Each structure stands twice: as structure tokens, then as C-alpha cells.
Image: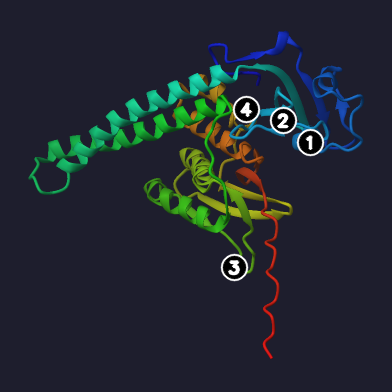
Amino acid sequence: MWNVASEGELKAGDMAAPGLLLLPRGGGPRLLGRSLLRQLGLEALPSRVGSLPELMAVAGFQRRAGSGSLWERDGQVLMAGEETLEDGALLLWTSPLAWDEAGVRRRVRYLSMASHDLRGSLANVRSYAALLLNGRVPLEPKVQRGLETILRNADRSLAFSQDFFDASRADLGALPCEQERQSLLPLLDAAVERQRAAASAAQVALVLGLNPEQAVPEVIVDGARIQHAVESFIQYQLARAQPGEVIRLGIRDFAPRVRVEVRRDGAPLTDEDAAAVFQREERAFREKRLEDPLRVYLARQEVEAHGGSVGVESDRGGSTLFLTLTQAPVAALGSPATMQA
């Protein structure tokens, strides 16, 4: 939970103990030690705290742009987050950091160069494979199957490299996000359509289940980032679905928040799997592969960079991965047109 970037750009401040605050499902918040108050510069805990953003706002911290876990106030940087415990309680944590702005910029530049070189080479491989498969040159079946395999793996490698470099930038608090006001519906539609073929191949029904009478709220987000997060949830559920199962996308209005759900009706996740969904390293070592753990972890970073949160729920009928976002404020109406005599 306390992992930070490598090579010394971010370092735990003087090995200080993390600040911990427990928010039980019933009862008031409970401090676990005094470190949290010292790090936030508070004399006492606020009387009402329901989430990490509320706590940080009271202490005068703002989320660092492009980061889900870094918060800053007058040059002070804290890493902070919240974890859902098995009994539904929330554990809020903070940890001080020494922030080397120049070092971070160098690291981001280095990552950008590496991304450009790797993706450029993969794009060339993909382009030539696609050129040979365009039908203008007759190919033996074995050669065609080989080129199709090259094309398919080039696409996977391009997607993986993009996720890897984006997650690395997010670890540094430098995930680029171009936010604009938009409806959630086109993003969910596009996510479903992009995963439709994979669901069909797995013999799994993929359904966007929205009530026609339900108003779809608007949000202020980077649409590509949120669509990627939703697709990542779909891919996670698809990898665990059995033929005949159903994956349903839906939204719930909890104004001022909106919750996007990706539910799989079928065998529920085990408690161990549910607890590890967003744990990148734990899943990678356990599953002996990084692709899906990285993709889902990046989804979490993308949502948190928008001030949202992610979670997982499991019951006897299936499992649900969800993300929450803040709804855009109602647009102000223009003044009535002046009546003409």
C-alpha cells in the first residue's frame, strides 16, 4: 500500500509512521495513533468525516493534478488513500513524502522517450503485417495464419505498453488527463461495443442495462481514461466468465456522485480474489502475468485522478466491479430572451 516511485524521486519522509484512521460502518471514526493529525496539521479530528476527500479538504490539501494518491498544500506533499476492509469499514491512511519536482520531470521525460521508441517499433510491425493481410497479395494459409498471429500480438503489446507507461506516469503524479463536460452514455456505449467481439467469442452476453426513463448524468472527465477504466472492468469479468453467463453494465445515481457498475452474473469471486482485484503486484506474482493486474490497477489510477473511487462487491449471485465519479453541476440556464414588442 505504501509503494512509491523508484530511483528516489519520491521518498517516505524520514521513515515517518503512516497516519491511520478507521471509519467503521457503525459508530464514529477512530484514530489509530497520532501520526495522521501531525501530518495533516490538525489539532483534533473533524466531527464528521466520511471519506478521504472530506478529510483532506478539511486539512486544506488538494489532490495533485494527474494523480490519485498525491495531495499537496503549500509545498507539502502527502501520499494518501483509502482501503475497504472485509467488514465494509474504510481505512484511511497518509504518508509524508519528500517531493523532488526536477527529478519527477526527468523521470517523466525518460518514460516518454521509452514509450515513443517502443510503441514506434511495435506500430511498424503491426503496419507491415496489416499491409500483407490486405488481400492484394495471395498468401498461403499457413503464412496468413502467421501474419494474423503477428498482428494480434502486436495489438496486445501496444495496449500493454501504453498501460505500463501510463501507470508509471500515474505513480509519479503525472498522468495526463484532458477533462471536459460530457454524458456517461457515449462512454459506456463505446466500451461495450469495443468488447462485444471478445464477449461473443467467450459465449458471454454483454449488456448495457440502462432504464430508458433514467437520466444519464453528465461528468467532467477525460473520456478516454474513463472508457479505458470501464473496459478494464469488462475484461476482468470476461476472463472469469463461463459460457452462458451475463455481464451487465449499469449506473446508479447517488447525487452528487454517480456509480458505474460492471456486474457478472455467475460464480462469485472468492474473498481472496475480491480483496486483490486492484492489487497490481500481489496479483501479478500470484497469477504469473502482469497484463490484467496492470490494466485494472491503471483503471483505479485513472478514476482516482478524477477524484473518484473504485471497489468490488461479491454475493451469491455474482460479483460487481464499480467506479464512482462526481456528477457535473447542473448547467446554468441562460437568461430568457428579451420579448419583442
Identify the residue under disc 4.
272
Q: Of the residues tagged 1 and 2, which is closer to the observer?
A: 1
Residue that appears at 61% across and 18% down: 3
Q: Is residue 321 visible?
A: yes
Of helix, strand and loop, which one carries label 2?
strand
Residue tagged 1: 57
Q: Earlier in the sequence, mark 2 or mark 4?
A: 2
Q: Position of residue 138 (x, y in %)?
A: 7, 45
Residue 155 is tagged as none
Q: Which of the marked residues, 1 or 2, is nearer the chain's N terminus? A: 1
* Kind of residue at badge 4: Glu
Q: Name the residue: 45% across, 49% down.
A: 204
- Which residue is found at the position 42% from the left and 32% from the top? 162
Q: Is residue 221 left or right of residue 54?
A: left
Looking at the rendered image, the disc whose residue lies closer to the viewer, 4 or 3, is 3
Residue that mark 2 sits on = 82
* Side of 337 where 266 appears, left or right: left
Does the residue at mark 1 contact the one at mark 3 (Cβ under 8 Å)? no
Quarter of image, res 41 = top right
In the picture, the disc for residue 212 is 3
CA gap, disc 1 and disc 4: 33 Å
Mark 2 surroundings: few (<14), some (14-19) or many (≥20) residues within 10 A: many
Judge by depth and name the residue closer to the eye, 287 or 68.
Answer: 68
Left or right for 41, reference 150:
right
Identify residue type, mark 3. Answer: Pro
Q: Indicate the quadrant where residue 73 lies.
A: top right
**Badge 3: few (under 14), some or many (20 or more) residues near its Cα, within 10 Å?**
few
* Residue that sits furthest to the bottom in the current view: 341
